[in-house]
Image (cartoon, rainbow, N blue to C red):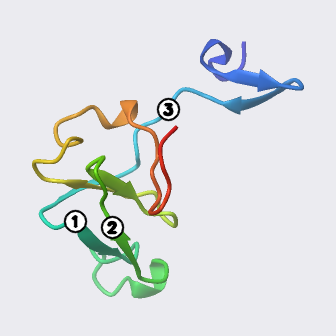
């Protein structure tokens, strides 16, 4: 059984949605508006990142960067302290389903 097929939905024989994986990196922040360039923590690493984007954390308490998948969680928000693997991806302006 490939790729934990029991946790995936299939359409026309293709696996299209599998169990959620945790984000590759979770950053707890104190402000609901954050910037991400994918390399701010790498000394001299600007060339290794992506264009700087500004993200707004909404009522769910977190937002995911559409470039690097970093998740920004608002300290004290509804997603703070929650198992991040259980939350759907939310890119800015999107709603979880």
Q: Residue 20 carries which label?
A: 3
Position of residue 11 in the picture relative to residue 32 (left or right): right
Label 2 or label 3, whichever comes before in sequence order: 3
Q: Which of the pair 37/91 is nearer the observer?
A: 91
| Percent of width and height locating residue 24 | 40, 49
Question: Dot 3: what SS?
Answer: loop
Question: Dot 1: what SS?
Answer: loop
Q: How crowded is mark 3: few (under 14 residues within 10 Å), some or many (20 or more)?
A: some
Residue shown at 23% from the left, 34% from the top: 82
Residue 37's place in the image compared with 89, above or below, is: below
Q: Which residue in the structure is indicated by mark 1? A: 32
Number of numbered discs visible in the structure rendering:
3
Mark 3 or mark 1, which is nearer to you? 1
Residue 79's place in the image compared with 47, above or below, is: above
Question: Dot 2: what SS?
Answer: strand
Q: Which mark is residue 56?
A: 2
- Dot 2 and dot 1 residues touching (CB under 8 Å): yes
The residues tagged by marks 2 and 1 sit, at their Cα atoms, a distance apart of 6 Å
């Amino acid at each position: 059984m490939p790729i934990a097929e029991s946790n995936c939905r299939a359409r026309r024989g293709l696996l299209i949605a599998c169990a959620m994986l945790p984000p590759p990196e979770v950053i707890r922040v104190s402000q609901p508006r954050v910037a991400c360039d994918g390399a701010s923590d790498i000394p001299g690493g600007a060339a290794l990142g992506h264009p700087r984007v500004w993200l707004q954390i909404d009522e769910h308490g977190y937002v995911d960067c559409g470039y690097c998948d970093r998740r920004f969680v608002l300290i004290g928000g509804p997603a703070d302290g929650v198992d991040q693997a259980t939350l759907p991806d939310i890119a800015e302006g999107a709603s979880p389903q």
